[in-house]
Image (tube, rainbow, N blue to C red):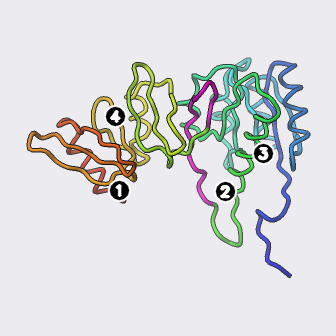
């Protein structure tokens, strides 16, 4: 008899929907019911009801509207305080919540209006996140890979943090340079740096932040500044203000 893992065996995924708009909720319900392996365990239309729903049903996956009567999606996740949080897909007509979504480990971001094809992409990401978080053969669960929710060509993409090489300031936005291309994030660089310095990123100047795993080498200059060469061939300036901290980050990284 062949040895099977949880990835080989069809799984049933308990799914909750939190959406206060009746038409949007109906559309989500139809898509969830048609998704492979999905079992709808409940719906909620307000933040207080959503907290109760998550606590009572302990879903594997939740499609969660951001703006709700009595609170928002972030209130719901904080107040539910589940020991095993569900893979969360935010559903909204707005894109300005990407920073808070990253902080909470949201796996995807469905921007209204969306079609079944886009829904299925979110479904696959949510299932992958749950599989990664499920122990198999006595091994501990792998940590869920953090993702950034970024805009490109009018669409929101979930980009793995490990695939981001460097980030540059662009007025009130930042431009994110990743292996899959360039993306925009409507957040000032200062706020991005505050969140990502604990995840292997280091600031090299007031306008640039670098993922240290992509650094090939640093060339210190007599002026106190420096030049950093990335594995992609990109070369960036390192200011005197940030050089010492950047060197310390490199020593602590795997470059």
Residue at which label 4 appears: 208
- Foreground mark, 4 or 1? 4
The magenta stretch spans residue 146: yes
Residue at which label 1 appears: 253
3D distance between C-alphas at marks 2 and 3: 18 Å
Q: Residues within 10 Å of mark 1 (few under 14, many from 20)?
A: some
Residue stretch in magenta: 142-157
Badge 2 element: helix
Badge 3 element: loop
Mark with earlier residue (2, 4): 2
**In the depicted view, which residue is nearer to us: 250 or 140?**
250
Badge 1 element: loop
- Answer with the quarter of the image where residue 210 lies: top left
- Foreground mark, 4 or 3? 4
For this orientation, the residue located farthest to the front is 233
3D distance between C-alphas at marks 2 and 1: 25 Å
Residue at which label 3 appears: 58
The residue that appears at 57% across and 22% down in the rendered structure is: 96
Residue at which label 2 appears: 132
For this orientation, the residue located farthest to the left is 222
The circle on residue 28 is none
The magenta stretch spans residue 9: no
């Amino acid at each position: 008899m062949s040895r099977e893992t949880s990835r080989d065996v069809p799984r049933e995924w308990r799914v909750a929907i939190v959406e206060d708009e009746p038409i949007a909720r109906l559309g989500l319900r139809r898509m969830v019911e048609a998704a492979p392996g999905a079992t709808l365990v409940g719906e909620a239309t307000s933040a207080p009801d959503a907290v109760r729903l998550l606590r009572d049903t302990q879903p594997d996956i939740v499609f969660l509207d951001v703006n709700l009567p009595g609170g928002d999606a972030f209130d719901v996740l904080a107040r539910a305080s589940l020991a095993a949080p569900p893979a969360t897909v935010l559903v909204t007509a707005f894109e300005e919540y990407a920073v808070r979504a990253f902080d909470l480990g949201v796996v995807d971001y469905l921007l209204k209006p969306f079609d079944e094809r886009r829904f299925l992409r979110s479904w696959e990401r949510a299932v992958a996140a749950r599989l990664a978080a499920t122990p198999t053969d006595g091994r501990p669960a792998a940590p869920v890979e953090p993702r950034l929710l970024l805009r490109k060509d009018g669409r929101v993409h979930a980009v793995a943090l490990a695939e981001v090489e460097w980030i540059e300031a662009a007025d009130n936005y930042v431009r994110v340079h990743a292996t899959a291309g360039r993306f925009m994030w409507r957040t000032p660089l200062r706020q991005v740096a505050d969140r990502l310095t604990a995840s292997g990123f280091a600031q090299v100047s007031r306008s640039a932040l670098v993922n240290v795993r992509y650094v090939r080498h640093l060339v210190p200059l007599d002026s106190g500044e420096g030049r950093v060469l990335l594995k992609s061939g990109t070369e960036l300036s390192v200011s005197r203000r940030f050089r010492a901290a950047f060197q310390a980050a490199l020593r602590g990284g795997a470059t």
